[in-house]
Amino acid sequence: MPSGEQFGIAAVTSTVELDDGTEFVTYSMVTRDAPEGSEAAEYWPRMPLVLPRDQHDEWLDPGRAGDETLVAEVQHASDEISRALTTEVPSTSVDSTPS
């Protein structure tokens, strides 16, 4: 993160029972549209849905329905972070001048 704050990447899980009775847990990363005008959007229209730290508990709350309302709330809350991750130029540069 540009300011060094913690964040997470949104994911969903699903547990399936295999033919032998064992459970198999699968994970899928949730994506969002890349912010318009961002460097990321120049290469691909999608990017991971970044979870701001203050949204972690909401996303992980087992009592909260994991529906499109929750995804929309998290996406709105992550707009600024997503734009910063995909548009800001690093403040340090590499000197490629031969010595």
Image: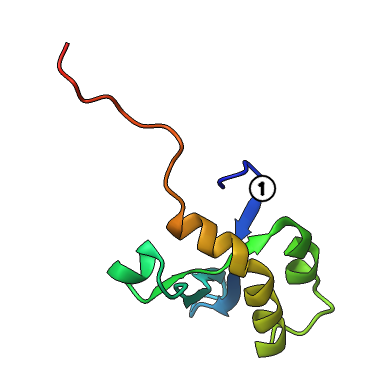
User: Residue at 62% of width from left, 75% of height from top?
Assistant: 75
Asked whether, in this view, residue 68 is left or right of residue 44, the answer is right
Tally of marks: 1
User: Residue at 65% of width from left, 63% of height from top?
Assistant: 51
Residue 11's spot in the image, x, y percent?
A: 58, 69
Give SS at disc 1.
loop
Type of the residue with mark 1: Gln
Estimate how packed mark 1 is, as few (under 14), some (14 to 19) or many (20 or more) residues with alpha carbons within 10 Å: few
Q: Is residue 57 above or below residue 64?
A: above
Asked whether, in this view, residue 29 is left or right of residue 73, the answer is left
Q: Is residue 27 above or below residue 53?
A: below
Q: Give the quarter of the figure containing the C terminus.
A: top left
Q: Is residue 63 above or below residue 79?
A: below
Residue 59's spot in the image, x, y percent?
A: 73, 70
Asked whether, in this view, residue 55 is left or right of residue 35, the answer is right
Residue found at the very far left of the displayed protein: 98
Residue 10 in view (yes/no): no
The image quadrant of residue 74 is bottom right
The image quadrant of residue 78 is bottom right
Residue found at the very far bottom of the displayed protein: 68
Residue 75 in view (yes/no): yes
User: Residue at 74% of width from left, 62% of height from top?
Assistant: 56
> Mark 1 sits on what residue?
6
User: Residue at 53% of width from left, 73% of height from top?
Assistant: 30
Q: Nearer the viewer, residue 21 or 56?
A: 56
Residue found at the very far right of the displayed protein: 63
Residue 96's spot in the image, x, y percent?
A: 21, 25
